Image: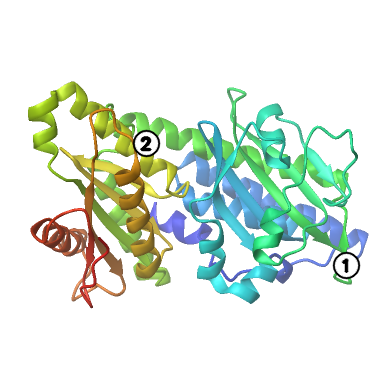
Amino acid sequence: MDELDEKIDLAPMTTASDVIDPSSLVERTRRRAYALEQLAALSVAVMQGADLGALMRRVTLEARRFTNAEAGTLFLRQGPHLVFAVAQNDELMRVLGDQGLKDLFQGALLPVDEPSLAGYTARTGQVVTVADAYDLPSDAPYRFNASWDSRSGYRTRSVLLVPLTEPGGNNVGVLELINARDESGRVVPFDPDDELLVRALGAQAAAAVENARLRKLSFGDPLTGAYNRRYFLARLEEEINRHRRSRQPFALVLFDIDNFKLINDRYGHVTGDSVLASVSHLLRGQSRGFTVLARLGGDEFGALLVDTSKDSALEYAERIRCVVEAYPFAHGRVTMSGGVAGVPEDNVGDLTSDRLIDAADQVLYEAKRRGRNMIRWHEGHRTHS
């Protein structure tokens, strides 16, 4: 698993323009041969159960390389929404940096039933090719949502969207490629001849998602739908090993429902179970597609945030705390406390899962001791409450 992850987990700053010049038939043939090689490698990685997040990033990057697209987004379907699992954009990377690009899309949800480009592809399973997103026909069954361009200062023109269709025929997401460029750097429409191979790359992503779903049936908590402690610890070990190789940051957040025993005692275990399931649902709704969420036992949840700085993890934890506090639970108000540990910031001595969990657990206990309904972390000891 570790060796395979290392082969497919590319650095965030890698760009699609690094590789291939599509200016001639020879180059086009080379580009297609390269894409087929990557497709075969991805197929092997999927069959061997490589890390889902790394596979999603690799699929998006290879599709961009093949089409010479400046940007790409991979959406995963979660109930009635699409979540941003991967967002790559060479231009915004230069302007915002890696973390700024992640923050732009983190936690964002796109309703599937809205007439957006991605929503239409998710609903219908149809490939959509657009030469100019700002010049769609009036009778088109979809619309371009320009608010993302307004927020980022980016200009979307040509777009190619393909569904992520798993072997059973269900659409589990969408791969969206933006702004194909020719050899001179001008934005051009996507080549229709490229659609078949991009669909094949999307199919590999769908197969990886299906494999992850099957793993979750084995490693899932039946009450909440989150992963169980066993799977969480295994993924934490994988992330520690990946950090040793790539030095990419990650963070661990431990959440605990405040006074949960009183809820059970006063309202009964059926209400308690409902609270646990609702909290898990809220966690998923505020998390990226490849954030690992688990019920670690009782009323304690854990979130493993890959490729995430400690500062971003603190913002994430505070957002979760606020969402839970504001949610209208049937029996009344519920609050949560949380403890955050980040790597490399909280890595003291030899990095192990036990030490990292203990670091997060210490500050979670401090939040409980200081009055609950707050997020705590090492260094500075500031408190959101």
Nearer mark to the viewer, of 2 and 1: 2
Q: Residue at x 25, y 32 (%)?
A: 275
- Quadrant of the image occupied by residue 100: bottom right
How many residues crowd mark 1 within 10 Å: few (<14), some (14–19), many (20+)? few
User: Does 110 sit above or below residue 270?
Assistant: below
- The residue wearing badge 1 is 186
* CA gap, disc 2 and disc 1: 44 Å
- The residue wearing badge 2 is 281
**x%, y% of residue 236?**
29, 54
**x%, y% of residue 208?**
51, 39
Colour mode?
Answer: rainbow
User: Does 281 sit above or below residue 337?
Assistant: above
**x%, y% of residue 377?**
23, 67
- Quadrant of the image occupied by residue 34: bottom right
What element does badge 2 sit on?
Answer: helix
Q: Pick the residue in front: 383 or 28.
A: 383
Q: Residue at x 57, y 74 (%)?
A: 97
Q: Residue at x 59, y 73 (%)?
A: 96
Residue 239 falls left or right of residue 204: left
Residue 14 falls left or right of residue 356: right
- Residue type marked 2: His
- Residue type marked 1: Arg
**x%, y% of residue 221?**
27, 32
Disc marking residue 20: none
Considering the image in quadrants, where does the C terminus appear?
A: bottom left
User: Does 382 sit above or below residue 42?
Assistant: below
Residue 140 falls left or right of residue 208: right
Q: Which of the two discs, 2 and 1, labels the residue nearer the N terminus?
A: 1
Q: Are marks 2 and 1 in contact (CB under 8 Å)?
A: no
